[in-house]
Amino acid sequence: AKKWINIRKSYGNFYKVPRNQTKLTIMLENLGMNYDGRPHSGLDDSKNIARIAIRMLQDGCDLRVNERIHGGQLMTVPSSVPLEGAPAPHMPRYRN
């Protein structure tokens, strides 16, 4: 993978919170969610990150690629870069 969405950056920018408020457990807590599973389990962390991403989409966030590797260097992708590929799937606007 040479391009990805750094959910911590997207969360901080969308909800206007400082970087120290973008740890996984803090993001979940601020969204009124509990951590599901065992901390630091790759699978459980991934599921919790997905729950955050779904909530952000429901709240109107336009998740976009915001980091990439170029020439072996980590680079930030500006939000003004056009979207690539197919349009994002439509997400239902309801909450659990």
Image (cartoon, helix red, strand yellow):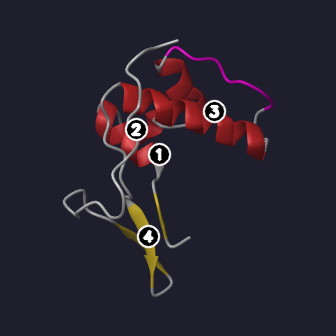
> Distance from label 3 to label 4 (Cα)?
23 Å
> Distance from label 3 to label 2 (Cα)?
13 Å
Residue type marked 2? Tyr
Decide: few, some or many residues near mark 1? Use Cα within 10 Å; few <14, some 14-19, many ≥20: many
Decide: few, some or many residues near mark 4? Use Cα within 10 Å; few <14, some 14-19, many ≥20: some
Return the disc, 3 or 4, that comes first in the chain's sequence: 3
The x and y percentages for residue 7 are 47, 45
> Distance from label 1 to label 4 (Cα)?
13 Å
Return the disc, 1 or 4, that comes first in the chain's sequence: 1
Residue 10 higher or lower than 85, as above or below: above
Return the disc, 1 or 3, that comes first in the chain's sequence: 1
**Dominant secondary structure, magenta:** loop
Quadrant into which the N terminus falls: bottom right
Furthest toward the left, the residue is 80
Q: Which residue is mark 4?
A: 68
Which residue is at 50% across, 73% downward?
2
Residue type marked 4? Arg
Decide: few, some or many residues near mark 3? Use Cα within 10 Å; few <14, some 14-19, many ≥20: many
> Distance from label 2 to label 1 (Cα)?
6 Å
Q: Which residue is mark 3?
A: 48
Q: What are the residue bounds of the magenta stretch?
A: 32-38
Say left or right for 84 vs 54: left
Discs 2, 1 touching: Cβ within 8 Å? yes
On whether residue 39 falls in the magenta region, the answer is: no
